[in-house]
Image (cartoon, rainbow, N blue to C red):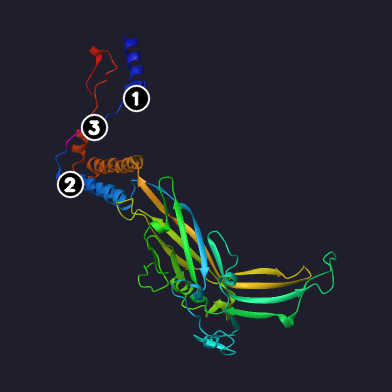
Protein backbone atom coordinates (compact mmCIF):
# COMPACT_ATOMS: atom_id res chain seq x y z
CA UNK A 1 0.00 0.00 0.00
CA UNK A 2 2.84 2.36 0.74
CA UNK A 3 4.40 1.70 -2.64
CA UNK A 4 1.06 2.26 -4.32
CA UNK A 5 0.78 5.71 -2.73
CA UNK A 6 4.27 6.68 -3.86
CA UNK A 7 3.47 5.66 -7.44
CA UNK A 8 0.28 7.70 -7.29
CA UNK A 9 2.19 10.82 -6.15
CA UNK A 10 4.78 10.40 -8.93
CA UNK A 11 2.02 9.94 -11.48
CA UNK A 12 0.30 13.17 -10.39
CA UNK A 13 3.56 15.15 -10.70
CA UNK A 14 4.41 13.85 -14.17
CA UNK A 15 3.75 15.92 -17.30
CA UNK A 16 0.46 15.10 -18.99
CA UNK A 17 1.63 14.63 -22.57
CA UNK A 18 -1.94 14.42 -23.85
CA UNK A 19 -2.56 17.96 -22.66
CA UNK A 20 0.81 19.24 -23.78
CA UNK A 21 0.59 17.77 -27.28
CA UNK A 22 -3.16 18.12 -27.71
CA UNK A 23 -4.35 18.63 -31.29
CA UNK A 24 -6.64 21.61 -31.88
CA UNK A 25 -9.10 21.21 -34.73
CA UNK A 26 -11.79 23.42 -36.17
CA UNK A 27 -15.28 23.05 -34.77
CA UNK A 28 -18.25 24.63 -36.48
CA UNK A 29 -20.61 26.24 -33.97
CA UNK A 30 -23.63 28.24 -35.05
CA UNK A 31 -24.00 31.07 -32.55
CA UNK A 32 -27.53 32.40 -32.76
CA UNK A 33 -26.69 36.05 -32.12
CA UNK A 34 -27.75 38.66 -34.67
CA UNK A 35 -25.06 41.07 -33.52
CA UNK A 36 -22.25 38.70 -34.45
CA UNK A 37 -24.02 37.61 -37.63
CA UNK A 38 -24.52 41.16 -38.90
CA UNK A 39 -20.93 42.04 -38.07
CA UNK A 40 -19.57 38.98 -39.86
CA UNK A 41 -21.70 39.45 -42.98
CA UNK A 42 -20.80 43.15 -42.99
CA UNK A 43 -17.12 42.26 -43.02
CA UNK A 44 -17.68 39.78 -45.86
CA UNK A 45 -19.56 42.37 -47.92
CA UNK A 46 -16.86 45.01 -47.45
CA UNK A 47 -14.09 42.53 -48.35
CA UNK A 48 -15.92 41.35 -51.49
CA UNK A 49 -16.49 44.95 -52.58
CA UNK A 50 -12.80 45.65 -52.00
CA UNK A 51 -11.65 42.58 -53.95
CA UNK A 52 -14.06 42.81 -56.88
CA UNK A 53 -14.77 46.54 -57.06
CA UNK A 54 -11.52 48.20 -56.05
CA UNK A 55 -8.77 45.63 -56.67
CA UNK A 56 -10.07 43.81 -59.75
CA UNK A 57 -12.23 46.35 -61.61
CA UNK A 58 -10.70 49.72 -60.70
CA UNK A 59 -7.05 48.77 -60.22
CA UNK A 60 -7.16 46.24 -63.08
CA UNK A 61 -5.36 43.64 -60.99
CA UNK A 62 -6.32 40.95 -63.49
CA UNK A 63 -3.87 42.33 -66.06
CA UNK A 64 -0.30 41.35 -66.76
CA UNK A 65 1.37 44.77 -67.10
CA UNK A 66 4.47 45.66 -69.11
CA UNK A 67 6.24 48.96 -69.63
CA UNK A 68 6.57 49.58 -73.38
CA UNK A 69 9.82 50.22 -75.20
CA UNK A 70 9.98 52.08 -78.45
CA UNK A 71 11.60 54.52 -80.83
CA UNK A 72 10.98 58.17 -81.67
CA UNK A 73 11.65 60.02 -84.89
CA UNK A 74 11.60 63.83 -84.86
CA UNK A 75 12.18 66.54 -87.41
CA UNK A 76 11.98 70.33 -87.51
CA UNK A 77 10.55 72.57 -90.21
CA UNK A 78 10.64 76.33 -90.64
CA UNK A 79 7.28 77.98 -91.41
CA UNK A 80 8.21 79.04 -94.94
CA UNK A 81 9.04 75.44 -95.89
CA UNK A 82 5.62 73.95 -95.12
CA UNK A 83 4.37 72.17 -98.20
CA UNK A 84 0.65 72.75 -97.60
CA UNK A 85 0.49 76.33 -96.29
CA UNK A 86 3.84 78.13 -96.30
CA UNK A 87 3.98 81.09 -93.91
CA UNK A 88 6.14 84.16 -94.31
CA UNK A 89 7.95 85.04 -91.12
CA UNK A 90 7.47 88.31 -89.26
CA UNK A 91 9.74 91.19 -90.33
CA UNK A 92 12.52 91.77 -87.80
CA UNK A 93 11.55 95.40 -87.24
CA UNK A 94 8.23 94.15 -85.82
CA UNK A 95 9.76 91.59 -83.45
CA UNK A 96 10.44 93.09 -79.99
CA UNK A 97 13.53 91.02 -79.17
CA UNK A 98 15.25 91.82 -82.49
CA UNK A 99 17.88 94.56 -82.67
CA UNK A 100 16.32 95.75 -85.92
CA UNK A 101 13.33 96.84 -83.81
CA UNK A 102 15.03 98.76 -81.00
CA UNK A 103 18.07 98.59 -78.74
CA UNK A 104 16.26 97.63 -75.55
CA UNK A 105 13.37 95.27 -75.06
CA UNK A 106 10.89 95.67 -72.19
CA UNK A 107 8.09 93.15 -71.59
CA UNK A 108 6.19 91.93 -68.54
CA UNK A 109 8.25 94.36 -66.46
CA UNK A 110 11.60 92.80 -67.43
CA UNK A 111 14.33 94.55 -69.39
CA UNK A 112 16.39 92.41 -71.76
CA UNK A 113 18.98 93.38 -74.35
CA UNK A 114 17.92 92.45 -77.85
CA UNK A 115 20.15 91.21 -80.63
CA UNK A 116 20.18 91.08 -84.38
CA UNK A 117 17.73 88.53 -85.78
CA UNK A 118 18.51 86.06 -88.53
CA UNK A 119 16.09 83.98 -90.57
CA UNK A 120 17.79 80.61 -90.40
CA UNK A 121 15.92 77.55 -91.61
CA UNK A 122 15.70 74.15 -89.93
CA UNK A 123 19.06 72.96 -91.32
CA UNK A 124 20.88 75.66 -89.32
CA UNK A 125 18.55 75.86 -86.32
CA UNK A 126 18.51 72.13 -85.44
CA UNK A 127 21.72 70.75 -83.94
CA UNK A 128 22.60 67.98 -84.40
CA UNK A 129 20.39 67.08 -87.33
CA UNK A 130 19.49 63.59 -86.05
CA UNK A 131 19.10 62.46 -82.42
CA UNK A 132 17.30 59.53 -80.85
CA UNK A 133 14.55 60.67 -78.41
CA UNK A 134 16.00 64.21 -78.15
CA UNK A 135 16.25 67.40 -80.16
CA UNK A 136 17.91 70.78 -79.69
CA UNK A 137 16.39 73.89 -81.28
CA UNK A 138 18.66 76.93 -81.28
CA UNK A 139 17.23 80.28 -80.22
CA UNK A 140 20.44 82.30 -79.66
CA UNK A 141 23.89 81.80 -81.16
CA UNK A 142 27.09 83.54 -80.10
CA UNK A 143 29.59 83.44 -82.96
CA UNK A 144 33.33 83.72 -82.28
CA UNK A 145 36.06 83.68 -84.93
CA UNK A 146 39.30 82.23 -83.57
CA UNK A 147 42.80 81.66 -85.01
CA UNK A 148 46.13 80.29 -83.87
CA UNK A 149 47.84 83.62 -84.61
CA UNK A 150 50.91 82.06 -86.21
CA UNK A 151 51.67 79.39 -83.57
CA UNK A 152 51.54 75.62 -83.96
CA UNK A 153 49.50 73.17 -81.91
CA UNK A 154 52.64 71.13 -81.28
CA UNK A 155 53.63 73.96 -78.93
CA UNK A 156 52.02 73.58 -75.48
CA UNK A 157 51.66 77.37 -75.21
CA UNK A 158 49.73 77.66 -78.47
CA UNK A 159 46.05 78.60 -78.08
CA UNK A 160 43.24 79.81 -80.27
CA UNK A 161 42.58 83.49 -79.83
CA UNK A 162 39.21 85.08 -80.62
CA UNK A 163 38.87 88.18 -82.77
CA UNK A 164 36.49 90.51 -80.85
CA UNK A 165 35.85 92.55 -83.99
CA UNK A 166 34.21 89.54 -85.63
CA UNK A 167 32.27 88.28 -82.60
CA UNK A 168 28.51 88.33 -82.97
CA UNK A 169 25.34 87.43 -81.05
CA UNK A 170 22.17 86.63 -82.99
CA UNK A 171 18.61 85.51 -82.33
CA UNK A 172 16.57 83.20 -84.57
CA UNK A 173 13.49 85.10 -85.68
CA UNK A 174 10.06 83.55 -85.10
CA UNK A 175 11.41 80.34 -83.60
CA UNK A 176 7.98 79.77 -82.02
CA UNK A 177 6.52 79.23 -85.52
CA UNK A 178 8.82 76.31 -86.33
CA UNK A 179 6.96 72.99 -86.35
CA UNK A 180 8.09 69.74 -84.73
CA UNK A 181 7.10 66.42 -86.29
CA UNK A 182 6.99 63.44 -83.90
CA UNK A 183 6.55 59.87 -85.10
CA UNK A 184 6.91 57.13 -82.49
CA UNK A 185 6.38 53.40 -81.99
CA UNK A 186 5.84 51.24 -78.90
CA UNK A 187 6.54 47.55 -78.28
CA UNK A 188 5.72 44.94 -75.60
CA UNK A 189 5.89 41.15 -75.75
CA UNK A 190 2.21 40.96 -76.70
CA UNK A 191 1.51 44.10 -78.76
CA UNK A 192 3.28 46.69 -80.87
CA UNK A 193 1.87 49.83 -82.49
CA UNK A 194 2.90 52.97 -84.33
CA UNK A 195 1.61 56.40 -83.36
CA UNK A 196 -0.18 56.57 -86.71
CA UNK A 197 -2.28 53.57 -85.61
CA UNK A 198 -3.40 54.93 -82.22
CA UNK A 199 -5.54 57.85 -81.07
CA UNK A 200 -3.67 60.41 -79.01
CA UNK A 201 -3.93 63.79 -77.31
CA UNK A 202 -1.85 66.25 -75.33
CA UNK A 203 -2.20 67.48 -71.74
CA UNK A 204 -1.14 70.82 -70.33
CA UNK A 205 1.08 71.31 -67.29
CA UNK A 206 -1.96 70.95 -65.01
CA UNK A 207 -2.93 67.56 -66.45
CA UNK A 208 -5.96 68.78 -68.42
CA UNK A 209 -6.47 67.71 -72.02
CA UNK A 210 -5.86 70.49 -74.56
CA UNK A 211 -8.79 70.25 -76.96
CA UNK A 212 -8.74 73.53 -78.85
CA UNK A 213 -5.69 74.03 -81.03
CA UNK A 214 -5.35 75.31 -84.56
CA UNK A 215 -3.31 74.62 -87.67
CA UNK A 216 -0.56 73.54 -88.07
CA UNK A 217 -0.89 71.63 -84.78
CA UNK A 218 -2.32 68.13 -85.14
CA UNK A 219 -2.17 65.28 -82.61
CA UNK A 220 -3.70 61.81 -82.65
CA UNK A 221 -4.89 61.84 -86.27
CA UNK A 222 -4.94 58.22 -87.46
CA UNK A 223 -2.61 57.61 -90.39
CA UNK A 224 -0.61 60.81 -89.85
CA UNK A 225 2.33 61.90 -87.71
CA UNK A 226 1.91 64.38 -84.88
CA UNK A 227 2.88 68.00 -85.52
CA UNK A 228 3.00 70.94 -83.14
CA UNK A 229 4.60 74.36 -83.15
CA UNK A 230 7.44 75.19 -80.78
CA UNK A 231 5.28 77.95 -79.29
CA UNK A 232 2.39 75.52 -78.74
CA UNK A 233 4.70 73.10 -76.90
CA UNK A 234 6.02 75.93 -74.71
CA UNK A 235 2.46 76.94 -73.80
CA UNK A 236 1.69 73.32 -72.88
CA UNK A 237 4.41 73.58 -70.21
CA UNK A 238 2.80 76.76 -68.84
CA UNK A 239 5.41 79.06 -70.42
CA UNK A 240 3.62 81.65 -72.55
CA UNK A 241 6.81 83.40 -73.69
CA UNK A 242 10.57 82.82 -73.59
CA UNK A 243 11.05 86.50 -72.78
CA UNK A 244 11.01 85.97 -69.01
CA UNK A 245 14.02 85.71 -66.65
CA UNK A 246 16.13 82.61 -67.17
CA UNK A 247 16.22 81.93 -63.43
CA UNK A 248 15.99 83.74 -60.11
CA UNK A 249 19.72 84.41 -60.13
CA UNK A 250 19.73 85.61 -63.77
CA UNK A 251 16.85 88.07 -63.76
CA UNK A 252 18.34 90.29 -66.49
CA UNK A 253 18.76 87.44 -68.97
CA UNK A 254 15.84 85.82 -70.75
CA UNK A 255 15.13 82.15 -71.40
CA UNK A 256 15.38 82.94 -75.11
CA UNK A 257 18.99 83.98 -74.51
CA UNK A 258 19.99 81.27 -72.02
CA UNK A 259 17.97 78.32 -73.30
CA UNK A 260 15.71 75.87 -71.45
CA UNK A 261 15.00 72.16 -71.01
CA UNK A 262 11.66 70.43 -71.61
CA UNK A 263 10.81 66.82 -70.72
CA UNK A 264 8.21 65.55 -73.20
CA UNK A 265 6.53 62.41 -71.83
CA UNK A 266 4.72 60.05 -74.20
CA UNK A 267 2.47 57.86 -72.04
CA UNK A 268 0.93 54.71 -73.52
CA UNK A 269 -2.07 53.01 -71.89
CA UNK A 270 -4.84 50.49 -72.52
CA UNK A 271 -5.98 50.15 -68.90
CA UNK A 272 -8.53 52.95 -68.77
CA UNK A 273 -11.33 50.71 -70.05
CA UNK A 274 -12.26 47.02 -69.99
CA UNK A 275 -11.31 46.72 -73.66
CA UNK A 276 -7.54 46.06 -73.76
CA UNK A 277 -7.44 46.49 -77.55
CA UNK A 278 -8.16 50.21 -77.04
CA UNK A 279 -4.56 51.49 -77.03
CA UNK A 280 -3.89 55.21 -76.89
CA UNK A 281 -1.19 57.67 -75.92
CA UNK A 282 -0.85 61.22 -74.73
CA UNK A 283 1.86 63.85 -74.48
CA UNK A 284 2.67 65.93 -71.43
CA UNK A 285 5.45 68.53 -71.47
CA UNK A 286 7.26 69.57 -68.29
CA UNK A 287 9.54 72.60 -68.05
CA UNK A 288 12.61 72.10 -65.86
CA UNK A 289 12.82 75.22 -63.72
CA UNK A 290 16.08 77.20 -63.47
CA UNK A 291 17.75 74.99 -66.08
CA UNK A 292 19.42 76.19 -69.27
CA UNK A 293 21.07 74.43 -72.17
CA UNK A 294 23.91 75.11 -74.57
CA UNK A 295 26.06 73.29 -77.11
CA UNK A 296 29.24 74.46 -78.81
CA UNK A 297 29.75 73.68 -82.47
CA UNK A 298 33.25 74.20 -83.94
CA UNK A 299 33.43 74.92 -87.67
CA UNK A 300 36.79 74.68 -89.49
CA UNK A 301 36.80 76.63 -92.72
CA UNK A 302 40.06 75.66 -94.49
CA UNK A 303 42.40 74.10 -91.95
CA UNK A 304 42.89 73.97 -88.20
CA UNK A 305 44.67 77.32 -88.14
CA UNK A 306 41.33 79.11 -87.90
CA UNK A 307 37.86 78.16 -86.79
CA UNK A 308 34.43 79.55 -86.02
CA UNK A 309 32.69 78.60 -82.74
CA UNK A 310 28.93 78.64 -82.68
CA UNK A 311 27.86 78.75 -79.03
CA UNK A 312 24.26 77.64 -79.31
CA UNK A 313 21.58 78.19 -76.67
CA UNK A 314 18.00 77.09 -77.11
CA UNK A 315 15.18 74.65 -76.40
CA UNK A 316 16.36 71.19 -75.42
CA UNK A 317 13.56 68.62 -75.74
CA UNK A 318 14.07 65.22 -74.09
CA UNK A 319 11.42 62.68 -75.11
CA UNK A 320 10.58 59.90 -72.63
CA UNK A 321 8.34 56.95 -73.50
CA UNK A 322 6.48 55.70 -70.40
CA UNK A 323 3.20 54.02 -69.43
CA UNK A 324 1.85 50.51 -68.92
CA UNK A 325 0.24 48.11 -71.37
CA UNK A 326 -1.76 45.18 -69.98
CA UNK A 327 -3.43 41.96 -71.10
CA UNK A 328 -5.71 39.56 -69.22
CA UNK A 329 -3.81 36.88 -67.31
CA UNK A 330 -5.61 34.21 -65.26
CA UNK A 331 -2.64 33.63 -62.96
CA UNK A 332 -2.52 37.34 -62.04
CA UNK A 333 -6.28 37.29 -61.36
CA UNK A 334 -5.93 34.14 -59.23
CA UNK A 335 -3.15 35.66 -57.11
CA UNK A 336 -5.27 38.77 -56.61
CA UNK A 337 -8.30 36.75 -55.48
CA UNK A 338 -6.27 34.49 -53.16
CA UNK A 339 -4.53 37.42 -51.48
CA UNK A 340 -7.87 39.17 -51.06
CA UNK A 341 -9.65 36.11 -49.68
CA UNK A 342 -7.07 35.99 -46.90
CA UNK A 343 -8.93 38.97 -45.48
CA UNK A 344 -11.93 36.72 -44.86
CA UNK A 345 -9.89 34.76 -42.31
CA UNK A 346 -9.00 38.03 -40.61
CA UNK A 347 -12.67 39.01 -40.40
CA UNK A 348 -13.54 35.62 -38.86
CA UNK A 349 -10.76 36.05 -36.29
CA UNK A 350 -12.09 39.49 -35.33
CA UNK A 351 -15.66 38.20 -34.83
CA UNK A 352 -14.42 35.17 -32.83
CA UNK A 353 -12.38 37.43 -30.56
CA UNK A 354 -15.38 39.64 -29.93
CA UNK A 355 -17.56 36.61 -29.15
CA UNK A 356 -15.28 34.81 -26.65
CA UNK A 357 -13.43 37.73 -25.07
CA UNK A 358 -15.44 40.97 -25.19
CA UNK A 359 -19.21 40.48 -25.42
CA UNK A 360 -21.19 39.98 -22.15
CA UNK A 361 -22.04 36.35 -23.02
CA UNK A 362 -18.42 35.47 -23.76
CA UNK A 363 -18.34 32.53 -21.29
CA UNK A 364 -21.33 30.90 -22.95
CA UNK A 365 -19.86 31.42 -26.42
CA UNK A 366 -16.49 30.06 -25.27
CA UNK A 367 -18.08 26.93 -23.80
CA UNK A 368 -19.67 26.16 -27.16
CA UNK A 369 -16.62 27.02 -29.20
CA UNK A 370 -13.95 25.17 -27.21
CA UNK A 371 -14.40 21.54 -26.04
CA UNK A 372 -11.94 18.97 -24.69
CA UNK A 373 -12.13 15.23 -25.31
CA UNK A 374 -11.18 12.44 -22.93
CA UNK A 375 -7.60 11.19 -22.88
CA UNK A 376 -7.79 9.02 -25.96
CA UNK A 377 -4.18 7.82 -25.73
CA UNK A 378 -4.96 5.87 -22.52
CA UNK A 379 -6.19 2.31 -22.50
CA UNK A 380 -9.94 2.15 -23.22
CA UNK A 381 -10.85 0.78 -19.78
CA UNK A 382 -8.86 3.61 -18.07
CA UNK A 383 -10.31 6.55 -20.08
CA UNK A 384 -12.09 9.17 -18.09
CA UNK A 385 -14.17 12.00 -19.34
CA UNK A 386 -12.77 15.47 -18.55
Res 258 → quadrant: bottom right
Query: What main secondary structure does the magenta stretch of the protein show?
Result: loop
User: Dot 3: few (<14), some (14–19), or many (≥20) neighbours within 10 Å?
Assistant: few
Q: Give yes or no for contact between labels 2 and 1 (Cβ–Cβ under 8 Å).
A: no
- In this view, 106 is above or below 302: below
Q: Quadrant of the C terminus?
A: top left
Instruction: Look at the image and tell me whether residue 309 can be seen.
Output: yes
- Nearer-N-terminus badge (2/1): 1
User: Dot 1: few (<14), some (14–19), or many (≥20) neighbours within 10 Å?
Assistant: few
- Nearer-N-terminus badge (1/3): 1
Kindly identify which residue carries mark 2. Answer: 38
Q: Position of residue 7 (x, y in %)?
A: 34, 13
Kindly identify which residue carries mark 1. Answer: 21
Kindly identify which residue carries mark 3. Answer: 370
Q: Position of residue 44 (x, y in %)?
A: 23, 45
- Nearer-N-terminus badge (2/3): 2
Instruction: Look at the image and tell me whether residue 288 can be seen.
Output: no
Element at badge 3?
loop
Q: Which residue shows up at 44% across the image and 67% down it?
A: 227
Task: Name the foreground residue: 309 vs 62.
Answer: 309
Q: Which residues are magenta?
A: 26-30
Res 283 → quadrant: bottom left
- In this view, 308 is above or below 98: above
- How far apart are the two marked residues, 2 and 3, measured between alpha carbons? 22 Å
**Residue 386: within the magenta?**
no
Task: Name the foreground residue: 60 vs 55.
Answer: 60
Viewer-side label of 2, 3 = 2
Q: Which residue shows up at 84% across the image and 71% down it?
A: 151
Element at badge 2?
helix
Q: Position of residue 296 (x, y in %)?
A: 66, 69
Drawn side of residue 214 relative to residue 43, left or right: right
Amino acid sequence: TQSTGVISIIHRNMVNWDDLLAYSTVKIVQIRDRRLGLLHFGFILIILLYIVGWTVLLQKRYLLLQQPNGSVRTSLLSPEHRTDKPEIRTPANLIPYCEQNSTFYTKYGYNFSNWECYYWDEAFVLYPIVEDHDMFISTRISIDVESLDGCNLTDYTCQYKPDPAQSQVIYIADIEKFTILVDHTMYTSFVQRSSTEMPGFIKNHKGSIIKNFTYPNQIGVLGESDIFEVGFLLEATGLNTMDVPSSESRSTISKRYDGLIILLFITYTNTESLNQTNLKYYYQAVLIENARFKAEQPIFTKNIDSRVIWNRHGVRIIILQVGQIGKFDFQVLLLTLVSGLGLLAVSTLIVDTLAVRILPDKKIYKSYKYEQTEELSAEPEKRTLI
